[in-house]
Image: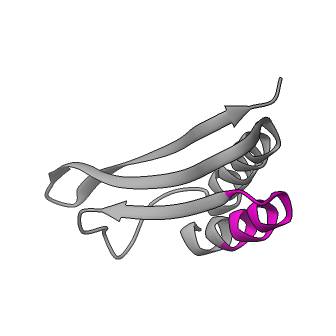
Amino acid sequence: IVATVKNDMALRAKERGIDHAVRIEGPLPGRVLVDPLRLTQVLLRLSSQMIRMVGQGQIALLVQAQSSKPQQTTLRFILEASGFYVA
């Protein structure tokens, strides 16, 4: 999922001349119970909108592993933008 979003962000950001980054904080679990299609759609749509809104600057996707219990880890996906915004 993250690789798909990263590749799409790279392509779209390059077309607009915007820097991009994907950062993963903490060890991520090997398996995740999620609807991969839906999560990918949401992350792609949000990152695409951010790229359109940022005129200059950088966008970043941050993936964090939150509190971890046995057999359960909560992941947080954060999209950040910095720079000049176009309304």
Colour scheme of the picture: one colour
Residues 74 and 48: in front is 48
Image quadrant of residue 29?
Answer: bottom left
Image quadrant of residue 17?
Answer: bottom right
Give left or right: position of 21 versus 68: right
Name, please, the residue furthest toward the left: 70
Residues 66 and 17: in front is 17
Give left or right: position of 35 versus 9: left
Residue at 53% across, 63% down: 21
Residue 60 place in picture, x, y as percent: 54, 53
Residue 73 place in picture, x, y as percent: 27, 54
Residue 44 place in picture, x, y as percent: 73, 54
Residues 86 and 61: in front is 86
Residue at 81% across, 30% down: 86
Q: Is residue 52 magenta?
A: no
Q: Is residue 11 magenta?
A: yes
Name, please, the residue furthest toward the top: 87
Residues 75 and 19: in front is 19
Region in magenta: 7-18
Residue at 74% across, 67% down: 8
Residue at 75% across, 47% down: 51
Instruction: Give the position of the N terminus as an image quadrant.
Output: bottom right
**Image mark count:** 0
Instruction: Give the position of the C terminus as an image quadrant.
Output: top right
Magenta stretch secondary structure, dominant: helix
Give left or right: position of 26 versus 38: left
